[in-house]
Amino acid sequence: MKTTFIQTKLWPFLCSLKLAIVLASAATLVVMAGSLLILSKPELFAMMDSMTLSLWLDQVASRSPLLTGWVPLAGLLLGLLFLNTLCCFIDWALAIRSRWRKSGEYLIHLGFILLVVAYFWGSMAGFRSEGNQVFVGQTVALKLPGMYLRLEAFQPIIGQSGRPMDMLNSLVLLKGDTEVARAQVRINHPLTWQGLVVLPASFGRTFAGYQPAGPGGARGEPVYKTYSLLTANYDPGAGLALAGGIAMGAGVLLALVSFYRKRARGERPEID
Amino acid sequence: MVNMLQAPLLYAAFGTYLLAVLLYLCHLLLRKPWLWRSALTLVISGFCLQSLCLGLRWVDAGYLPVTNLFGTQFFFSWALAATYLYFELRYRIHAAGLFVMFCNLLLLGSALPRDPAIPPLIPALDTPLFTLHVAFSFGGYAFFAMAFSMGVLYLLQRRMQSGLLPDLALLRKVNEEAVFLGFCLFTLCMILGSIWAYVAWGYYFSWNIKGIWSALVWLFYGGMCHAKFVRRWQGSGYALLSIAGFGIVLFTYLGIGLLMSSNHPLD
């Protein structure tokens, strides 16, 4: 009796197309309304990219639940949409022999599933760390236990207008005393290692004393030390997110091929 | 060389499109085949001129020049013309796609008085991911504009039953195809944008207003790709969704780009 209810009512409901539309519409409306608050309340929302979502919910959103409540609500709706998509994908996979022509569309579903899992994983187990001040030759500890970053060389690239254009950082990533990665990090070229991503954010200089006094006893020129400001984020779900993106991209290409083949055969969308 | 050719090419493309739209309007009233054939020839000519201009600007800059408002308007207009040509050559929609050509004229016309100079490329944009992200984005927007056009005409045709417009079945078919193709291109835009965000900022989804609304555009049209299978949402419902969807697209591109502070500024 229980099995029959699951097979005839619950499972079809969980896989339902209409449920997907209702959840996607509800999530769209909630985020639309909520996003209007983002610009009017920068003290609450401006930091969302500087920390993981779970940390933001814990440290910032909890202070103003009324103004930030749309974020967990949208998360809940997207979570339900994730479950619906997962059930839909499993339902397709179980009948793949007769429904393989829809592989493109379901690869897009799989991509969405992987992306949601990856984002949740990264939010829960990752961290974001901005403005790490590192001098040339200095080794700093990262938030990941046992991991260190050493800046071996730094060269800012200044444009003709005097505006900084790029920052060349020769970086070494260490696990204890062992080197695990080495890269020249600049804009759009980060150092990546097992979910850790290190990239340049800015640079500056700090006063480091004076040059030795001259023969007349006059004080020497001031000396400045240049430092690099680095962002070091850790997202264990980044690889899974990339896999989701690849699945989605492949799904789009397959769906396009399938779409034109169907149109060539004169098939119309089936009616639910 | 490019500076010398750019203005004449731009104005020639605009003039050609304008004449094409006028001929299509005449065709709506007079129903003479030579009118739409001439109009189509003009659209193709205008598109060739605009493509040549885009190609010259691209070669001159060394990157796809879409880093300011002029560049994005010009590229969006080119994508709209390409979309129109695709549907015209495939389905012979003639004047039914006029809205897209009006959008094209509006974009190109408002871009003409702006400074077409190509700004130097900042290192953050110096990546193929930028080119692909922007190209797929405007390709998707152009298809969504076509879907909007088909949605409006579907509702009009349902009420008027006019012989001047394509039948409801064709309008629905083109609308669905435009939404599907737009969704596919926009998905690729989002994937490439996310990869670029990860290598540039260290995270692949930004809670910036532009990132959020781009995700909304994707979610909305993803929902529409499902809605076409539900009887209640076929026909008029789908047409209304196409109109609403384009409202979201316009807000995401122009509303946020021009009126709000975001990580995708237009000017």
Image: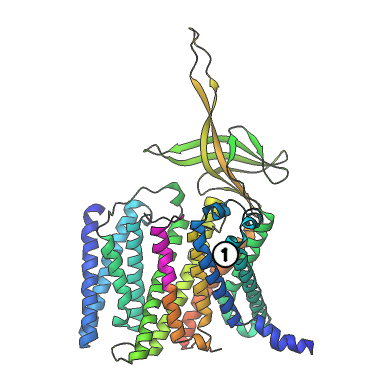
Q: Position of residue A54 (x, y in %)?
A: 66, 57
Q: Residue at x 38, y 76 (%)?
A: B146
Q: Position of residue B253 (x, y in %)?
A: 41, 63
Q: Residue at x 43, y 81 (%)?
A: B240
Instruction: Give the overall secondary structure of the magenta segment.
Output: helix
Residue B177: say if magenta. Answer: no
Residue B247: say if magenta. Answer: yes
Figure quadrant of residue A19 = bottom right
Q: Horizontal placement of B129 versus A120: left or right? A: left
Q: What's the magenta region?
A: B246-267
Q: How is the protein colored in the picture?
A: rainbow
Quadrant (top left, top right, bottom left, bottom right) of the C terminus of chain A: bottom right
Residue ID for mark 1:
A245
Q: Horizontal placement of A246 versus A12: left or right? A: left
Q: Residue at x 42, y 61 (%)?
A: B256
Between A65 and A125, the one nearer to me in the picture: A65
Q: Horizontal placement of B228 versus B18: left or right? A: right
Amino acid residing under circle 1: Gly
